[in-house]
Image: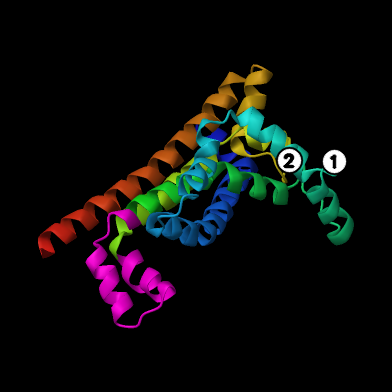
Amino acid sequence: MIDTLLNLEWGPFWLSFKLAGITTALLFIVSLPLAWFLARTKSKVKPILEAVTALPIVLPPSVLGFYLLWGLSHNSFVGAFIEDVFGIRLVFNFTGLVIASCFYSLPFMVQPLQSGFQSLNNSMLEASFLSGKSSFTTLWRVALPNIKPALLTAIIVTFAHTVGEFGVVLMVGGSIPGETKVASVAIYEFVEVMDYGTAHIYSGVMLLLSFLVLLGGYFFNRKERLHVGGSV
């Protein structure tokens, strides 16, 4: 068993976690102002924005993957423009995977952050505004430090969800070794050729790594809640 693990092809695991790390970082940058806006606004367009943001949760991965494949390919205006002007091909490469993953995992970053912002005491935010602080300063210096559990949940869930995605990744990226062949795709291919032994090992490693990521997040959140409770 140890020899098998030592001789294991770790490339797909590295790609999975690299993809999840980059996607999580990009989504944090994009989702932070979006979640802040959704939590604070009373605009009539809020339900529409929330529905669009949550759409990847209920949309079948094959449907989302198909539209992303079409939208990023040379068949669409966006894909053709980027490929012709910048020389960047967005399908069947790692860049396309990152873009597709950002769309697929968007609600898993936005919704916990939005819930965290909505749970804040409005008096605390109003005091910051009255003292002359800008919206950005209030968000960064007041709001974020007070929603640490929600922030950590958003980061961990987004990371774990991206690591485990399969349908969108396969449709947009295919299975190119060292480029788009992530662990979930590798497991699918092992099962397809009935190599259940290797599929078990890959699945077990992914299960263990995912469990450790979630365990670390729950442990930190529990520690944070105890710290807050003890300081009250």
Predominant SS along the magenta part: helix
Q: Return the x and y of residue 59 as percentages of the image width and height.
A: 56, 31
Check the image and report above or below for 212 versus 148.
above
Residue 164 visible in the picture: no
Label 2 belongs to which residue? 177
Q: Residue furthest front?
A: 44
Q: Residue at x 82, y 43 (%)?
A: 76
Name the image quarter holding residue 3. Answer: top right
Q: Secondary structure at mark 2?
A: loop
Q: Residue at x 39, y 39 (%)?
A: 211
The disc, 2 or 1, on the residue closer to the chain's N-terminal end is 1
Quarter of the rendering occupied by the C terminus: bottom left
On screen, residue 72 versus residue 120, left or right, reads: right
On screen, residue 164 versus residue 171, left or right, reads: left
Residue 229 tag number: none
Is 63 inside the magenta-drawn segment? no
Q: Are marks 2 and 1 in contact (CB under 8 Å)?
A: no
Q: Return the x and y of residue 119 as percentages of the image width and height.
A: 27, 54
The magenta stretch is: 117-145
Q: Secondary structure at mark 1?
A: loop
Q: Return the x and y of residue 190 as percentages of the image width and height.
A: 64, 24
Check the image and report above or below for 134 versus 86.
below
On screen, residue 82 versus residue 104, left or right, reads: right
Label 1 belongs to which residue? 75
Is 121 inside the magenta-drawn segment? yes
Pick the residue in front: 56 or 194: 56
* Amino acid at pointer 2: Pro
* Amino acid at pointer 1: Asn
Q: Return the x and y of residue 50 as percentages of the image width and height.
A: 48, 45
Check the image and report above or below for 67 versus 85.
above
Check the image and report above or below for 40 versus 90.
below
Pick the residue in front: 153 or 45: 45
